[in-house]
Amino acid sequence: MDEPRDRLMDMLLREQLGGEAPPDLTERILARAYPARRRTGLRILLLAASLLIVVGALSWIAVRVLSEAPYPLPSASGSFEVVGGGPLQRGSVLRTQDKTAKLELGGYSSVEIMPRTVVRLDGEKHAEAISIDSGEVRCAVERNVGTFTARTPMGTAAVLGTQFTVRVAEEKGAGDNSEKWVIVRVVSGLVELTGEWGVARLTAGTEETFRVLKGKSPETRGGKAIGVVTSKGDAFIEVRSDGEEKPRRYMPNWVGGAGGGLDKAMLAAIGRTPVGSRVKLDWKFEERPRVTKLEAIAPAVNPK
């Protein structure tokens, strides 16, 4: 019988007959299965895994803390007063005199309040809004953060990621004859105007003017437009403005009173402008939309 086997038999006999406990071979087995070099590497791997777990947990906690950061409260700077006193908050009415002020809403909406302007803070988290009673504001809204609405006597201007101005002119007349003028001009992006009169979309470089009579629906009084000529005739031109689904028909001004006629210079300009060309125009409303200035800014594409 070989030596290892004899030693094993001897150990069993001593255990059974003498009641001796078997020797602890754990260290010897581990030493043979995992040499010192491998055990060191194993310890390093376990330490690295522990560090990864700790770093991951800390990162998760940081993300939760940042995501649960408090929503920014309204803040304002510059020269202004809160009508009626009290802190600046939703529902507050701000008024400027001879200088401008700046309003920050939600961390994504910035409103420059021009002199002699009255503005009320409306809205809620991620849906900021202001109401303009009189004066002018210039608004800038970051894209894909939240919505922003400017409310006027004409209706609302709803935007997402754009720059635009709104001006409410001072009232004229008194009593039932009082009126206001609301002018909306888009610097960049898209503004959707909504009111009792309907819906209109303005794109960069366009402007709309509305007359608001007391007790009556607002009327569109004129503005600027950029778009494509879809059709024309001897006395009209149709242009589909950027962002609009349907074109609008414009006619020249009527000049010369009862014995006059349509503006001959504008009739000639319409005649020189091919269908399909991209144009920029000024217009006003007198019985119907009338083009007062017409400029081609790009040649016709696939003219019909």
Image: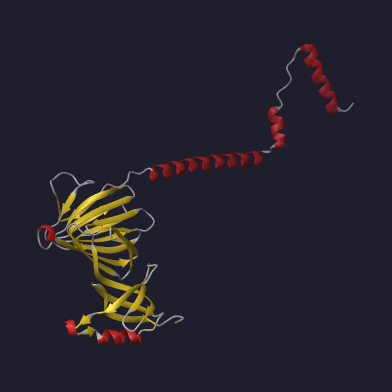
Q: Is residue 21 above or below residue 246?
A: above
- The answer to whether 68 appears left or right of 11 in the picture is left
Count of numbered circles on the image: 0
Query: Is residue 105 shown to the viewer in this render?
Result: no
Q: Quadrant of residue 248?
A: bottom left
Task: Report whether residue 154 is seen.
Answer: yes
Q: Please, is residue 137 above or below residue 295 in the view?
A: above
At a point 65% along the width and 41% down the height, the residue shown is 37
Q: What x and y, as percent, mark residue 195? A: 28, 58
- Which residue is depicted at the point 39% across and 78% down? 231
Determine the image quadrant of residue 153: bottom left
Residue situated in front as seen by the camera: 243 or 3? 243
Q: Nearer the viewer, residue 201 or 103?
A: 201
> In the picture shown, does residue 166 fall above or below 282?
above
Instruction: Name the spot of residue 122 as percent of width and height, x first.
Output: 25, 49
Residue 210: percent from left, percent from top: 23, 65
Decide if residue 87 is on the left or right side of residue 234. left
Q: Position of residue 258 (x, y in %)?
A: 17, 82
